[in-house]
Amino acid sequence: MLRLDVNFFDYLILGIYFALVVAIGVMARRAIATSEDFLLSGRSLPAWVTGLAFISANLGAIEILGMAANGAQYGMSTLHFYWVGAVPAMVFLGIVMMPFYYGSKVRSVPEFLLRRFNPATHLFNAVSFAVAAVLTAGVNLYALALVINALIGWPIWLSIVISAVFVLVYITLGGLSGAIYNEVLQFFVIVAGLVPLVVIGLHDVGGYSGLKEKVTHTALGPNSFSTWGGTNVGHWTNPLGDWIGIVMGLGFVLSFGYWTTNFAEVQRALSAKDLSAAQRTPLIGSFPKIFIPALTIIPGLIALVLIPKLGQTKDLTYNDAIPLLMNRFLPNGTLGVALAGLLAAFMAGMAANVSSFNTVFTYDIWQTYVVKGRRDRYYLKVGRVITVVGIVIGIFTAFIASGYSNIMNYIQLLFSYFNAPLFATFIIAMFWKRTTPWAGLAGLVAGTLGAGVMHFAGYHIAYFYPGGAFDPAHTTINAQMLNFYGAIVAFVADVVVTVAVTLVTKPKPESELRGLVWGIKNPDAPDPAKAPKPAWWASPKILGATSLGIVVVLSVIFA
Amino acid sequence: MSDKTNPPNGETKSAAARLFDIRVLIGALFTLYGIMLVVAGFFTSDAQRKKASDININLWLGIGMLVLGLLFLLWWRVNPLKLAAPDEDDDTEPSHD
């Protein structure tokens, strides 16, 4: 088992970091007087803060270890998760969708569905999101405990409890501001921790050209550095399947769905101080996102070259790529910084889920359906209590995950069915004012079922197996590709059913749709001409176009 | 400090304007880490240096973090935080000295 050579100096660096994490929570507490202060940072934060938090909220265990693992397993095609998936979705969120979210003053993504559709649609989305968020928090907690256990040797249960206590302290005290400020700090520490790994690693394998040449001689082969090679429809050989699955499934459906409707992300933008800052949140976040693959995929490939048998045995899984490199390269000191970054990232992954869970529970479930019409102070208290409850559920989830890791995989799979159709429903809701309240619920349910059915049916379709060679044991199936196609089916099912139900049911009067649908202005919204304008270079359109431009250029270079 | 959190209508007012500036903490932490790593860089043993492919990574990372930390502190000094206070004066006025 891998055990890092941590000394006093590393522990000192870790200790300073964790003290600061708690200090941020304590110091953010004085800025909390209302439930909106606690759950939405009082809508007061500048765009660069929310923009970095937007990225960090996603930069948890699954992202860092998982994308390095994907890099080692699939090669450069993993870039599609960033340049086809995440970045265009962030630009779309900032420029097209944020005016509806922020302009309508909703406090959460489910609340948008309540105002646009009806309580049934709202409850379906609020409950599935709340349950998914709190379980995901538990999975992140478990991943964190695994790393602490592997790297510094504390027992799993102790790691779970201690990490949970840190998160508990800083978000119960500091609320969303505590979470967001820690995410911003964590962003810089994780970058500081991963850059040395990339620099030393590349130096060791003979630079980028050396890496390319050496990876070509591994099992991944010459296609490992080609992102679009082998993506022909009909006879794909790319590890992520054909281009329809990549562009439509991964890009248009899954990534747009995640980045534009997942409240853990959108919440960061809603906490910004004005509409312009809210729009710039995902746009500013998209710039670091373009370059994060250098810190995840490259270490994955370096590990593939330097560590024999990576991914071949039970003790050396692809997920270990980054910890293995840390162990091999980093001297004490730098090791402490990298460890602090890694642990901080995993805590942030948990905190982001808990801080979005408590908001949806307080506003969308408790205040909307259970105890209505009380004073704000009451809901602030509810928010605090439910934060503690969420963390306790997270701890239990982590303990269950430590006993039955397969159960967690199934639960994650189940929630992916709920996520797949969301983008279809939102995009129709925002651009077709005729869409009726019941069409919202019917579309979401149909899409969820579609994703589930496709997932099971896909195992019997030879096309999803490499070379079209059906494997009765289902072991060689391209699970990523099937996942992408499942998303496409969910999207189509959602659109078809939403349109069909709309045509036979009664739409909402326009007066109830103000500010929620394209073309129906909200007369109460603050006049955009009066809002302070950012500098010309920071206008949302320029930022979005620049971000997309960089991605196009890089995509051509790395094609 | 709680004088203006309870206006007469009974509803609590946002205290978001009292939020501190994260740039101070990022700047302070990176400056401190930077100094610690630079110092450690001068005492890193040959074995540890060899481990890092013959790069004195403690020194270089230390310099990098120190520079970033000082830049954050500079940014904070030059352009202090103005959080959007809903109305009336807030207590985050930058101190002019």
Image (spheres, rainbow, N blue to C red):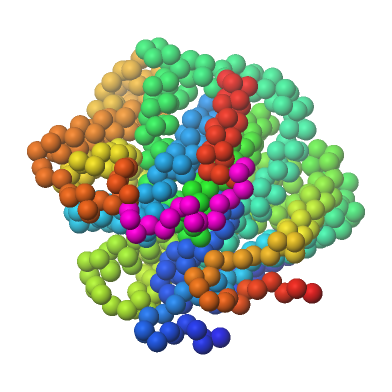
Position above or below: A34 against A239: below
- In the rendered image, which quarter is residue A452 located in? top left
Answer with left or right where residue A550 lies relative to residue B35: left
Give B78 or A333, whichever is nearer the viewer. B78
* Residue A396 at x, y percent in the picture: 38, 62
Residue A449 visible here = no
Residue B15 visible here = yes
Location of the C terminus of chain A by quadrant is: top right
Q: Residue furthest left?
A: A504
- How many numbered discs, if any? 0
User: Measuring 81% from the left and 38% from the top, which residue is drawn there?
Assistant: B53
Magenta stretch secondary structure, dominant: loop
Give A546 or A406, whichever is nearer the viewer. A546
User: Measuring 83% from the left and 41% from the top, which residue is drawn there?
Assistant: B55
Q: Which residues are magenta?
A: A522-537
Instruction: Find out whether residue B4 is within the magenta segment.
Output: no
Q: Residue furthest top?
A: A235
Answer with left or right where residue A538 lies relative to residue A362: right
User: Measuring 72% from the left and 52% from the top, which residue is drawn there?
Assistant: A335
* Residue A537 at x, y percent in the picture: 62, 42
Give A522 or B44, whichever is nearer the viewer. A522
Instruction: Find out whether residue A535 is within the magenta segment.
Output: yes
Position above or below: B89 against A321: below
* Residue A411 at x, y percent in the picture: 33, 47
User: Measuring 37% from the left and 80% from the top, which residue is drawn there?
Assistant: B11
* Residue A327 at x, y percent in the picture: 69, 46
